[in-house]
Amino acid sequence: MTNVVLTGFMGSGKTSAGKRLARMLNLPFVDVDRLIQERAGCSINEIFARHGEPYFRDLETDVLREVLLQQGRVVATGGGAVISPVNREMMHAHGVVVNLTAPISEIEKRLAFATDRPLLHADKGAKIRLLLEEREKFYADADVRIDTTGKNIEDVASEVVAYLKGNNLWNS
Ligand code: S3P
């Protein structure tokens, strides 16, 4: 079994749907952001504040590479992991890439009180719109895109399972 790699903007539901999906498929769940924080020994906010975004992105690529060397996992990536062509190539080489989408209004709602996303510390609304626009082409580089609008975690995870089964990527 290959990996199932979830991509999507902050607040698109990668972690919650990923955990549910992993249970449905009976596969381990891996959260790249969590591993980055464990590796760095501090929060993502602190990594950005102490070392800056480029350092975070290098760490993200290192951790993603290690994670994708294993097979048969559901992997939730950070919202910016798709920016790097190296990362996207690794995701496609070692997994089925599933992009979760949500309308801006929904993303804004979900992130309204979030303080743990360093890229959104100032001008949240404008920054969300800018980043979404800049990244759309990278999120579109997926095997399948799933619109999470109006769906709960269970629905989203079931849709991924249906896609995998329908494309003979999962057969148990
Ligand atoms: C980021 C998204 C975050 C985290 C970091 C940068 C981004 O992950 O990796 O704050 O660039 O979009 P989530 O998408 O899990 O919030």
Image: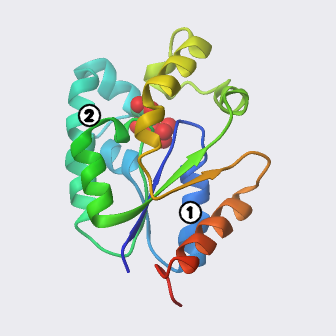
Does the image show residue 39?
A: no
Does the image show residue 133?
A: yes
Q: Position of residue 2 (x, y in %)?
A: 36, 74
The answer as to whether callout 2 falls within 8 Å of ligand 1 is no
The correct choice, above or below, for 35 with respect to 3 in the image is: above
Horizontally, residue 81 falls left or right of residue 156, namely left
Q: CA distance from mark 2 to mark 1?
A: 24 Å
Amino acid type at mark 2: Arg
The quarter holding residue 96 reads bottom left
**Residue occupying the far bottom of the picture:** 172
**Residue occupying the far top of the picture:** 123
Q: Secondary structure at mark 2?
A: helix
Q: Nearer the viewer, residue 128 or 39?
A: 128
Q: Position of residue 18 (x, y in %)?
A: 54, 60
Horizontally, residue 93 falls left or right of residue 132, namely left
Residue at position x 40%, y 26% from top?
45
For the image, the number of numbered tags is 2
Q: Which residue is mark 2?
A: 57
Which labelled disc corresponds to residue 19?
Answer: 1
Q: Secondary structure at mark 1?
A: helix
Horizontally, residue 6 falls left or right of residue 113, namely left
Q: Quadrant of the N terminus?
A: bottom left
Q: Position of residue 9 (x, y in %)?
A: 52, 37
Q: Nearer the viewer, residue 71 or 32?
A: 71
Residue at position x 50%, y 29% from top?
116
Residue at position x 22%, y 26% from top?
54
Other-residue count near label 1 (Cα within 10 Å), few / some / many at <14 / 14–19 / ≥20: many
